[in-house]
Amino acid sequence: MLESDSEDDFEGYVDEEEYAERYEYSDIENNSNSENECEMEEDICGTASDDEMEIENETLDDSKDSEDSCSSSASSGSNISATPGPSFTATPGPTQDMTNKNPLDFFRLLIPDSILEEIVKQTHLYAEQIFEENDLPPRSRAQMWDSSQHDLSELKKFLCLIIVMESIHYPAVEDYWSISWPFASSTFSSIMKRDRFSLVLKFLYLNDNSHFIPKGQPGHDPLHKIRPFLNKFWIIFSLVFSLEEKYRWMSQ
């Protein structure tokens, strides 16, 4: 029979009294550490809360000041009286009686001869600039241009054909002068020859190119080519039609 090992033979053996002493000491040490940690947390938390209280007090003071300034400005603003603008007395709608008028009358109302004459002038000027600035081949179609033929009457014929083209669509411009089926018609050729129409279309212009300011330079106008007529149309449209009050700013 083996002899029982004594309690002292076990490695790390501690008797009850020693264990109690060690355990009690450990509890005391842990409690002291936790108390120190709590004290540190209280110090940190207390410091942070004090700073937060100061910030909160400053925020409340600032909001109070802003409320006071708003109330003072509101009270001072109440003493200012707004000056009423001119009352709107115009009657919205057409300014002229167009009863029993035909489409040509409307066209003349919106596009008077003064505008068409300016187009004729600018077309002549542009043709001159093309011939001066370019060495055109002798067989170029542009060499067939005759300025003496282009006048107000020809421009009206040209615009008439343009309007008709918007109503009757053919695959190509040349088809309107075709003599073959299914486009055969003498209407266009009786008003203006095909080559002459092409020349007017080539040289038609609305504004002097010599006044053009390139992009990127001061004073550049993206609408330079139509600017004079755009300004005239604004005036004409405001004269023949009165806008409602809420749209009145567009004609200013």
Image (cartoon, rainbow, N blue to C red):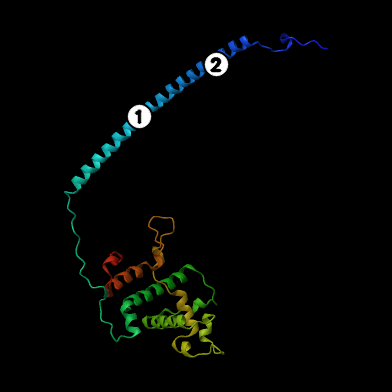
Residue 22 found in image quarter: top right
Could you tell whether 13 is left or right of 205 in the image?
right
| Most foreground residue, 14 or 250 | 14
Q: Amino acid at mark 1?
A: Met
**Where residue 155 sits in the image (x, y, percent)?**
40, 80
| Most foreground residue, 75 or 141 | 75
**Where residue 158 sits in the image (x, y, percent)?**
42, 81
- Write the residue at 50% across / 19% down: 34
Could you tell whether 75 is left or right of 215 in the image?
left
Query: What residue is pinned by disc 2?
Result: 27
In the image, residue 84 above or below residue 178: above
Q: Secondary structure at mark 1?
A: helix
Residue 57 found in image quarter: top left
Residue 27 found in image quarter: top right
**Where residue 132 sits in the image (x, y, percent)?**
46, 69
| Most foreground residue, 194 or 31 | 31
* Farthest-out residue, front: 1
Mark 2 residue crowding within 10 angstroms, few (<14) / some (14–19) / many (20+): few
Q: Nearer the viewer, mark 2 or mark 1?
A: 2
* Farthest-out residue, right: 1
Query: What residue is pinned by disc 1?
Result: 53
Q: Is residue 251 visible?
A: no
In the image, residue 5 above or below residue 146: above
Q: Amino acid at mark 2?
A: Asp
